[in-house]
Amino acid sequence: MQIQEIETPNGRFLFAMEKEYVMLTEYRGKDIAVSLPDFVTDKPVTVVGKKAFLGCKDLRELFLPDTITTIQDWAFACCSNLEVIRLPKKELSIGQGILKDCNRLEKICTEQVDSGQKSILEQDAAYLLAATMNKLDAFYLFDTMAAGSMSWLEQWDSRMLFLMEQEDAEGFSKMLLCGEEDYGSRENNLDYYIEQKRRTKVRLAMLRLLHDTGLRQDIRQTLLTYIRAHKKGEASEETWKVVLEEHGDEKPYYQFLIDTECITQKNFDAMLEDMGDYHTEMKAFLMHYQSTKLEKNNVFDSLTFDL
């Protein structure tokens, strides 16, 4: 079997040249963004081989051509900084664990990602499709053809609600009995386990509310109730912790807190105190909101009128 190499700006592809097609067997390099060619010496690149990109920690964006038909086991596993992947919108043969431990994956696009004309549906579907792998643990929903359709969204929401309705302590005893964590580690602490479970639910609820195509009103209300129940000042503050610790300088998430009524005059000062000397732009954004909106709303709320 002939092996052909093609250089990238900071690495190289290794291709196996079959009779009718080409298979990528391995990528070696430190590229941040990689585009796989669609043809090599006039033969279509149709297969991404087993473990082809395994452990590529520099990789953030990966674009696969429309010629791809097969992605073998663990093809992109352990690409811990991978954020965006573009896959063809067609029926694909998918191996196991292709995106295992790609915890930063945000979007799986099925259209050309450089197009500035993508609809809201396409944008939302890209985020929700990625979540089927790293948030929902729902491989059966990993379908580039169906993603974004109403039936697919209904299945997505059903799986989300199943996870949201689980007891926070569910699975803790099983984890201990199976010895999944080292004895004495913080993962063996029930309070820590519950906090992480709540954070997972907050991330799910936040994702769906931010990408709300096809979201039923009753489900929206369920998610809003959960988000508000864990804002700053409540018995548990996972909504605030997720925003501060995971999105500390990202304005859309602070706007999300405003839009979901998770910032109040009562908890405002405590939030600024948590931010300390960091996130100065976001502190300025919140202080502007307080001076222009929050204080005015508080004044109007305190007024009473005799009729």
Image (tube, helix red, strand yellow):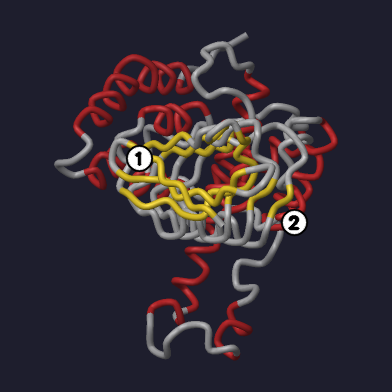
Report the quarter where the N terminus lies. Answer: bottom right
Q: Amino acid at mark 2?
A: Phe
Q: Nearer the viewer, residue 31 or 122?
A: 31
Which of 125 and 11 lies nearest the eye of the viewer?
A: 11
Residue located at (64% from left, 31% from top): 66
Dividing the picture into quarters, in which one does residue 187 lie?
bottom left
How crowded pointer 2 is (Cα within 10 Å; few <14, some 14-19, many 20+) is rated as few
Question: Residue 174, position in %: x, y?
Answer: 63, 84
Residue pictured at 74% horizontal, 39% vertical? 219
Q: Which residue is mark 2?
A: 162
Residue lying furthest right = 151
Q: Is residue 130 above or below residue 145?
A: below
N-terminal of the pair, mark 2 or mark 1, is: 1
User: Mark 1: which secondary structure?
Assistant: strand
Location of mark 1 (residue):
7
Q: Is residue 303 left or right of residue 286?
A: right
* Quadrant in which residue 253 is drawn: top left
Frontmost residue, 252 versus 146: 146
Please identify, in this view, whether the residue under mark 2 or under mark 1 is nearer the observer.
Answer: 1
Q: Name the quarter where the C terminus is drawn.
A: top right
User: Which residue is depicted at the point 31% across and 40% down?
Assistant: 248
Give percent across and percent down for residue 267.
Answer: 37, 40
Identify the residue at the far top of this view.
307
Do we see residue 199 in this rendering?
no
Q: Residue at x 63, y 56 (%)?
A: 72
**Residue 173 appears in the figure:** yes
